[in-house]
Image (cartoon, rainbow, N blue to C red):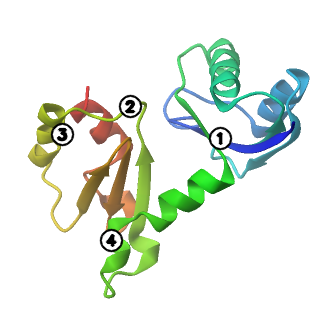
Amino acid sequence: MKYNYIALLRAVNVGKTWIKMADLRQMLAAEGFQTVETYIQSGNVLFASNDAKSQCSRVIAELLEKACGTPVRVFVKNAKELAEVAAGNPFLDEPSIDPSTLHVTFLQEKPKRPTLAKLAEIHARDDRYAAVGDIIYLHCPNGYGRTKISNMALEKALE
């Protein structure tokens, strides 16, 4: 059975971890993934596969580590999961919030309560977050580019 997925790649094409999207598409197609498409230079990849998400994630992570020379976190999701993530955003309950200021960060695992306390130490100004399972929902009214609650800050706080 063929499944349609999206692979969300953490920290690709920022810093020292660069790969051309044409090379990424070719690399994944050579590994047997089908209908491989990338979204701009983001490292996000749409593809089809007969394999389970966990298998796809592992294979893509291994390929990227070889190609980039550094580990890359890979989150593979299907359309139903993404729809549930979007619908579950707790900030949607606030009618005054502009949806374009809402963002999501996926984590490898659900953080523990003591670890979550470290997030409170980030001086976030107007930005807010909500941890729900292995997802961090963000509201960044001044733009994600200005937030102190970036993926890097989240990962550092949650180590």
Q: Secondary structure at mark 2?
A: loop
Circle number at residue 91: 4
- Left or right placement of residue 11 versus residue 8 in this view: left
Circle number at residue 116: 3
Quadrant of image for the N terminus: top right
Above or below for 26 versus 130: above
* Of pointers 1 and 3, the one earlier in the residue sequence: 1
Alpha-carbon neighbours of circle 2 within 10 Å: few (<14), some, or many (≥20)? few
Mark 3–mark 4 Cα distance, whole angstroms, equals 19 Å
Q: Nearer the viewer, mark 1 or mark 3?
A: 3
Where residue 101 appears, x then y in whole percent?
Answer: 40, 71
Amino acid at the residue labelled 3:
Leu
The residue at 69%/24% (across/down) is 60
Mark 1–mark 3 Cα distance, whole angstroms, equals 28 Å
Amino acid at the residue labelled 4:
Phe
Q: Which residue is mark 1?
A: 43
- Left or right placement of residue 145 versus residue 147 in this view: right
Amino acid at the residue labelled 1:
Gly
Q: Which residue is mark 2?
A: 109
The residue at 16%/36% (across/down) is 113
Quadrant of image for the C terminus: top left
* Of pointers 3 and 4, the one earlier in the residue sequence: 4
Q: Nearer the viewer, mark 4 or mark 1?
A: 4
* Of pointers 2 and 3, the one earlier in the residue sequence: 2
Q: Nearer the viewer, residue 53 or 6?
A: 53
